[in-house]
Image: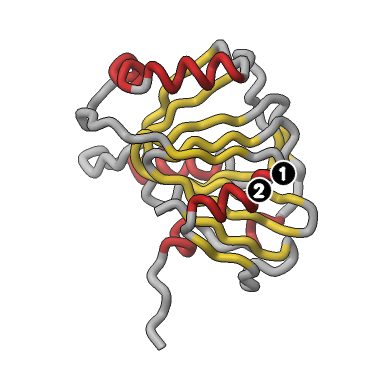
Amino acid sequence: MTLLQVMPADDGANVLVRTADLAEIAAELAPHGIRLERWDTVPLAADAGQEQVLAAYEAEVARVAAEGPYPLVDVVRLVPDDADPEWPAKAEAARTKFLDEHTHDEDEVRFFVEGSGCFYLHLGDKVYAVVCTAGDLMSVPAGTTHWFDMGTRPHFCAIRFFQEEDGWVAGFTGSAIAAGMPTLDELLAPAPKA
């Protein structure tokens, strides 16, 4: 379920907006130049490689790549591997890589083929936590202060769009703001029963 939760930047426990309505989410994000759209998903094998994923979404990928322009496109996949005793450490290392607030010199454009992840957008005096799930295309403009959480048990496959090979390097702000916001796991946890 795609989800938006808006909080004051200095109080992650204070929920100003919480909605799963895609039109409402897009309307909240659009004034900041952030694009969220939904594509129909295509059934793929669990082990589908980059070529199969890109072929399944060929028309959509070509459209977004041309609009960018984003001449470089790849597929990233991270799924639990309980047979690998090192998987928890690998997953945590991948997760913590982008958990701190940062910016990029180019747009961050990602389409979720499967699974989920959360973009946290620090816009003015608010944080917009956007949980993206299969079928969501999210485009975050260059220079937007944000971070990304894939959860404690990462599971996603995403198509990524790039302008340059080295343009998507994170420039960390040094802010500890992320520590005061709910994690992806907390955002998706069932509400306590009254």
- Taking the image as shown, residue 50 lies to the left or right of residue 72, namely left
Q: Amino acid at mark 1?
A: His
From the top left corner, tell me how far across and down residue 43 is, in percent: 23, 32
Evaluate whether residue 155 shows in this view.
Answer: no
**Residue beneath the point at 53% across and 51% down:** 23
Residue carrying label 2: 121
Mark toward the start of the polypeptide (1 vs 2) = 1
**Residue beneath the point at 53% across and 21% down:** 64
Quadrant of the image for the C terminus? Answer: bottom left
Is the residue 63 above or below the residue 114 in the image?
above
Q: Residue furthest top?
A: 71
Asked if disc 1 and disc 2 are in contact, CB closer than 8 Å, the reply is: yes
**Residue beneath the point at 56% across and 63% down:** 182
From the top left corner, tell me how far across and down residue 172 is, in percent: 72, 38
Quadrant of the image for the N terminus? Answer: bottom left
Residue carrying label 1: 32
Circle count: 2
Label 1: state its secondary structure: helix
Q: Residue furthest right?
A: 124
Q: Nearer the viewer, residue 59 or 121?
A: 59
| Quarter location, residue 10 | bottom right
Label 2: state its secondary structure: strand
**Residue beneath the point at 63% across and 54% down:** 128
Is the residue 16 above or below the residue 172 in the image?
below
From the top left corner, tell me how far across and down residue 59 is, in percent: 40, 18
Residue 194 image label: none
- Nearer mark to the viewer, of 1 and 2: 1
Q: Nearer the viewer, residue 77 or 97?
A: 77
